[in-house]
Image (cartoon, helix red, strand yellow):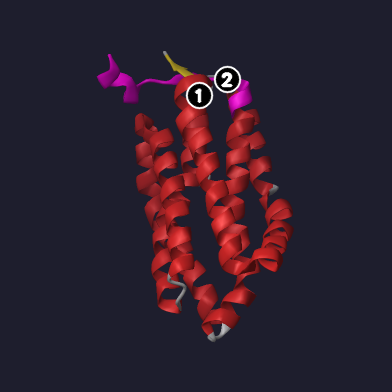
Amino acid sequence: PDSDRSTLSFVMHPRAIWAIGCGQLVNWGVLFFAYSVLLIPLEESFGAPRGLGAGAFSLGLLVSAAAAPMVGRLADRGQGPAVMRAGGLLAAALLIAWTIVPTLWMTYVIWGALGLCMAAILYEPVFAIVGRAFSDSDGRLRAIATVTVMGGLASTAFLPGTSALVTRLGWRGAVVVLAIGLAVTSLVVAQIIFPLRACRWK
């Protein structure tokens, strides 16, 4: 029955692993690596020391660490795809809101909330989902390694990519583009691939 679905395991198509890996590449790139590129333009925009701007990102990491156990429990109950979709869309909305009211105190508020999104869309729920999708340890390890490597490429893609966007569009325009990319990949991975193509419930 559908009511028991959260307690069951599912089978994931191998191609879905690469899609999830691409999603992790974007998630890590937007919510983790891009901020280091934004620090200098934020310092100029806020007229505040760079350390204060970096503090907002540190707050996000603290919130993410605090929220990770809760997200892991939801993923273990079969809610991982829904959590990832909601987290990605909320993160995109928060990033766009940040560009509309770009003050230092709002940056702390936004990135505190983005910490919840980090917990929802980075490795924690993905590893829980992938772990449940493979009954054999070799397949599970290969899948986790693939997703990890894809996420690790985020710095290679998003450090120069974000810098190019900032140069061309300014930091606000760059953040809007990043937010749109995050929203699109979140929908593709969590809304289309997971329920319709990537898995079938046993």
Q: Nearer the viewer, residue 41 or 199?
A: 41
Residue at image point 38% right, 48% down: 69
- Say left or right for 119 vs 13: left
Residue at image mark 2:
13
Residue at image mark 1:
133
Q: Nearer the viewer, residue 149 or 186?
A: 186
Dot 1 amino acid type: Ala
- Say left or right for 143 vs 1: right
Residue at image point 65% right, 29% down: 142
> Looking at the picture, how far across and down is residue 162, in whole percent?
67, 60
Q: Nearer the viewer, residue 187 or 10?
A: 187
Crowd rating for badge 1 (residues with CA inside 10 Å; few <14, some 14–19, many 20+): many
Q: Is residue 160 magenta?
A: no
> Looking at the picture, how far across and down is residue 189, in whole percent?
52, 34
- Say left or right for 81 vs 167: left
Dot 2 amino acid type: His
Residue at image point 37% right, 20% down: 8
Q: Which residues are magenta?
A: 1-16
Picture quarter containing residue 101?
bottom left
Q: Is residue 3 magenta?
A: yes
Crowd rating for badge 2 (residues with CA inside 10 Å; few <14, some 14–19, many 20+): some
Secondary structure at badge 2 equals: loop
